Structure formats: C-alpha cells, structure tokens
Amino acid sequence: MNKKYRSIFNPDSNEPFKVSRSKIDSFLNCPRCFYLDRRLGISQPSMPAFTLNVAVDALLKKEFDIHRANGSKHPLMEHYGINAVPFNHENINKWRENFVGVQFFHEKTNLLIFGAVDDIWINSRGELHVVDYKATSKEGEIELENTKWHNQYRRQIEVYQWLLRKNGFKVSDLGYFVYVNGKKDRKAFDGKLEFDIKIIPYEGSDAWVDKTIGDLHNCLISDKIPDAAPDCEFCQYRKAANNVENVK
C-alpha cells in the first residue's frame, strides 16, 4: 500500500489513518484524551522510557530466536508443558518492529490498525499463540489480577489475536505472558540483577475489537470533543489547573 499516513486525523481525507494497538487502549481509557491526541494533535505528557524492560525484551527475543531457528522448544516451554515452538515466519521481525507490526486495513472505517508483537508460538495443530513479555520487580508470586494495568495487558494480547486472524492466520484463544520478576531479596547487587521467569497462560477473546474500532472511528469523525472518563487523571489535572488559573 503505497500511501502516506497523516499523524493527525483529518475527517475529510481519503488517506488511511494509522491507529496503533496502544491508541485503541487510549480510547478505551479516556475518549477525550484520545480525541485531543489523534484529532487535535494535543498529546499527553510523555512517560520516561522503561529501558530495563526494553533490555529484558531484547534478550528474551534473542533467546527464543535460537529455538525459532532450530524449530525447538525453549526450556521454559518444556517446563510448563506447552505444546508449541516459536513461530518461524519470514515476517516475524517486521511484526515485532515498533510503528510497523502486524497490520490490517479496516476498510469500513479507512483505518490502518497495527501492533507490534513480542513473540508468536505455533502448536502442533498449526494454531498461533500470541506471546507478550512483561518485566517487573515485586514481592510474591506474579499473577494476573483485576487491575487497570493487567486488564490493559489482556486487551493487548486480544488485539494481536484479532490482527493475526484478520491476516488469515489460525489463532488460538490461548495466549501467554512470559513474566520476568526482578529479585530484591539478594544480599547485594554485585553488578547483576537476577530474575524469576514465569509463563502465565491467558484465554483471550477479541469479540470486542470490531465494535471498539467502530466507536473509535465515530469519535474521530465527530466535531465535538467527547466527555472525559471519570477516572482519567490527566483530565482531572487539566480541569483542576484550569479552575485555579481562571480564578480572578
């Protein structure tokens, strides 16, 4: 598709508009913030780069790529009894590249939906498993909880499942988190950080994605700025600051 994509949505343009997996999540978190960002070009303040997480991702990819090339299971997959191997596909590096990823042109809305996966595994039935790497450092066992961040992680896998299905692949509902937890109980740092690694299965459903893309598109084409989400910290801060500044 030899087309250029605008960074700010123009409802009168015929050019496909790129919407990333993270922007879908932004819309779900707060339609007002999403609209200000994608329609009007007013982005939220940037977050600091999680460089340690990036390093963990890079090393895990190198590790699983060895088994991808050999068609073998990673020892972690053996340990958890996972009947799959890393998926060796000619586009795997493109699918993992930020701002490229797995792409699908949603013709009804003229949106190009994309997202960069961490990994994909394939089982003996030819089904793909979406895999996401996560890194943290906390006490106790890592489990998926009913929290804002963990629900975002769930949706992340489900969008990737949707994208791969739209590209014609047979995709299992079962995805995996490779969760890396930095140990803080060592006597000293000694120039190294040790981790526990756990694979957490997750049964996803992408049934919500198509409707959300339609809602997101309706938000973009509207000339009205939507209401803020009740729990949006950015909107609460912006409102409080405006109230103070407007006091005479």
Image (cartoon, grey):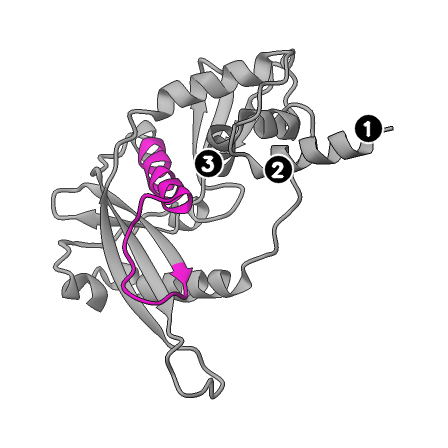
Mark toward the viewer: 3 or 1 = 1
Mark toward the viewer: 2 or 1 = 1
Q: Residues within 10 Å of mark 2 (few under 14, many from 20)?
A: some
- Label located before the other in sequence (2 or 3): 3
Q: Position of residue 93 (x, y in %)?
A: 42, 51
Q: Nearer the viewer, residue 79 or 121?
A: 79
Instruction: Check residue 246 in the rendering and tell me which mark sits there, or answer none.
Output: 1
Disc 1 residue type? Asn
Q: Position of residue 120 (x, y in %)?
A: 30, 48
Q: Tell me which residue sits at (69%, 29%) in the image.
A: 41
Instruction: Check residue 98 in the rendering and tell me which mark sits there, or answer none.
Output: none
Q: Tell me which residue sits at (29%, 60%) in the image.
A: 142
Disc 3 residue type? Arg
Q: CA distance from mark 2 to mark 1?
A: 18 Å
Q: Are marks 2 and 3 in contact (CB under 8 Å)?
A: no
- Label located before the other in sequence (3 or 1): 3
Secondary structure state at the residue bearing disc 1: loop
Residue 212 vs 201, above or below: the answer is above
Secondary structure state at the residue bearing disc 2: helix
Over which residues does the magenta segment extend? 135-163
Q: CA distance from mark 3 to mark 1?
A: 37 Å
| Quadrant the C terminus occupies | top right
Q: Residues within 10 Å of mark 3 (few under 14, many from 20)?
A: many
Name of the residue lying farthest toward the right: 248
Instruction: Check residue 21 in the rendering and tell me which mark sits there, or answer none.
Output: 3
Q: Are marks 2 and 1 in contact (CB under 8 Å)?
A: no
